[in-house]
Amino acid sequence: MAAVTQVPAFCDGIQYFADALPGLDTYGKTPAIAEGSQSIASPTDAAAVYQTLLYADALRYLTLQVTGSKASGHPGGFASQAEAYAALVMLGHKNIATEVGHHAPGFYSAMFLDRSLEAMGINTVQQLRDRFREKHGLLGHLSGYIPGILAPAGPLGQGQHFAMAGALLHRNTLFPFTMGDGGMGEPYPMSSMAHFHTAYPSVTNFLPVLVWNGYSQEHHSMVSLQTNEGMIAYWKGNGFEEVILVDAKDFDDQNQSGAFVDSTAFSWDKRLAFTQAVLEGANKAAESALGGKLTVFIIKQLKGAGVHARGAKSHNLYAHHTLDNPDIVAGLQSRALPAEAWELVRTNCERSAGGPASKVAVTESVLPLADLGELPLEEYEVGGEKKVATTSMGRLVAKVGEIDRQYLVTNADGNEASGIANINQALKIIHPTTDPLYNQQPDGQVYEPLSEDACAGLAAGLALFGARTLWCSYESFAINGLPIWQTVTQAMAELRRPTPSTITLFTAGALEQGRNGWTHQRPEIEAYFAAMMRNGNVFPLFPTDANSIQVCYDWGLSTSNKGIVITASKSPLPIYTTLEQTRQGLQEGAIVLKESTGSKTIVFAVIGDMILLPVFEAANQLEQQGYGVRIVSVVSPRRLYRPTDVAWDTCSESDGQFLDDAGFDRFFGGDVLLGITGGASGMLEPIMLRSSSKRDTIAWKRGETTASANELMAFNGITPEGLVKRAVELG
């Protein structure tokens, strides 16, 4: 290794430099991306190929240097596709997402090299090392916090949603996303891409980049025995018209055993030949995807190529993998570059796509949105004709879609079954078969795959990328889409720009699903949101009636960087509130629906709409016994926490409004407090934490097949007689 003293300032923290590299004097005289250009001139240009290889090795070196500095992190997966990532950037593409959270140190290295991380105050490799896996630094997995990173990554099977969202919003931009052997094995990516392509056959500007390296985290991948021909047939069988596979084995001159080989072990000339094949393949794939063909690019190379270990053993570092560890030292020294090569790589990275990803990626600026103006809320008479809340909201959703043609509604189980057929009638289901009877046409705005993951993924991904969306689901099935929705809301909590909140509508609650039995009765999902409320940017809303739901939706549209969960029934129910009452309820958390005086005050804190029916009946019985009763409809339980219960102040576009103690006592002060919900009891936590009254919760226990909602409530102990009995016992 060379003892270099004159090195670029950004290289401070690089431990090893090479004396020289073959061909550097010939092919490294000037940057392959010329000044004023945004990409290389040709993928066959010898200097461009050479400098792409330099970039790939620079990425490998930094990935290992950064992870080794903390003896923690995942270098192996990214290392196996470094040539592919480098090729895409050299070709001028920087809107690159991933579904592989373990590729994070490689992505951070790329963002460092193009100067994106300077927005975080990371100017040198030493600072890159210092802030890796540290608070307010470079998280172990990609998040919404890092400049230049388009989307978060963690759970497998999510990356395609972000790439498809970007492609839908920006038709002339390429959105590659890397996916690993394991991610391909998830049940969602292929089906979601197939449905998307059927719905949007002309939107092909997203590009899966399969990192086929033979291994997962701890063992061989399940497709490690697949032949190249079989892999190509698999992708073509799933609708991909163009499958471009570059196999490192075809260039191996070192007689490596097995189907997966390490290109960094090749002779220099063969390394260049492999890099040229990747560069040409990536260029062809990009042109194909941008040209209207559903395309996949596959790079087949051994996991861990060029780092401290190979195969699954390269996946992550352990405590002994410090920068003094012989394997780490050997890996760094083998990938070391001369100082002038680092300068060359950085210049190319800066110039690619017109600047740092932190400035040019589509997610780094606010997407222009149509002005909705004032939505036409319709106020129904209190105590008048019963109304279906979801239908009332559907009318507003239709209006939003008519104004904002970018707006998308997703639903896996059918809007008509949820009382929102008016959405389909106005906005039309996206379908290749035009059929007015079923409200279908190719250019609709209602996206209906039969996968909740695909519904939640595209809706949440579009919201993260700056568009308005609505994910509709039956409460009982939505759980299958929540992992990516949670990923996105967490990213929104730390995002560096405002973006429309991701809004959901969950209908057909357990109480309405008696005849369907427990398969359709899963209100436990509310416990999921109850836990997420403490994040600070998640707002589960429980509109009281058809007036209330309109105000809740209207409010959600006005918010940014939040997860808004609206849960409502699809049955005709009484009108209890005015529009203004819910506006106030969204600020204070609750609405008083009934109040009377008596010997003692019994307070019912109620979450939900249909559940109010037995509560009002119980109130009448208690009043007949001389008790005073207050029925409080809890619209936004998040408002009822204490500020210290919630991480609101850590959130982007933070909302720190909570009901004060005086307001809480005004709603819930009394001799007895009963928290009532047809869902999970955890949603009542904010109230139970703060109350000093004698109190209890009456909530959902389990599902059963029944003939009516009343019978199902009775099975769970929610009857007027039961409520009265418990109130009297406590009083």
Image (cartoon, helix red, strand yellow):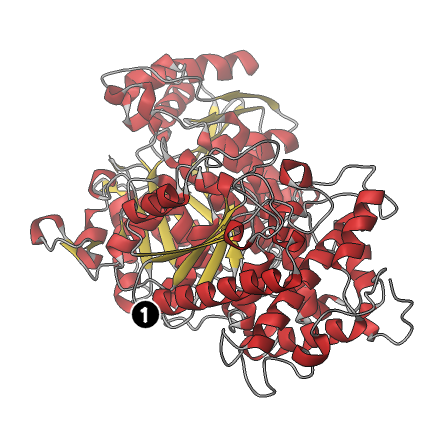
Q: Report how many numbered discs are placed on residues in the image.
A: 1
- Residue 506's place in the image compared with 85, above or below, is above
Q: Mark 1 packing: few (<14 Cα in 10 Å), some, or many (20+)?
A: some
Residue designated by label 1: 291
**Residue 444 position by quadrant:** bottom left
Quick check: 449 left or right of 226? left
Quadrant in which the C terminus is drawn = top right
Residue 653 at x, y = what percent? 59, 60
Residue 602 at x, y = what percent? 51, 25
At x 69% / y 68%, what residue is drawn? 113
- Residue lying farthest bottom? 36
Of residues 94 and 217, which is closer to you in this image?
217
Q: Of helix, strand and loop, which one carries label 1?
A: loop
Residue 244 at x, y = what percent? 40, 57
**Amino acid marked by disc 1:** Gly
Quick check: 641 left or right of 584? right
Of residues 590 and 508, which is closer to you in this image?
508
**Residue 481 position by quadrant:** top left
- Residue 642's place in the image compared with 552, above or below, is above
In this rendering, does residue 135 appear at all? no
Of residues 558 and 618, which is closer to you in this image?
558
Quadrant in which the N terminus is drawn = bottom right
At x 83% / y 68%, what residue is drawn? 19
- Residue 698's place in the image compared with 371, above or below, is above
In this rendering, does residue 208 appear at all? yes
**Residue 722 position by quadrant:** top left
At x 58% / y 29%, what residue is drawn? 670
Residue 627 at x, y = what percent? 47, 22
Of residues 509 and 83, which is closer to you in this image?
83
- Residue 561's place in the image compared with 3, above or below, is above
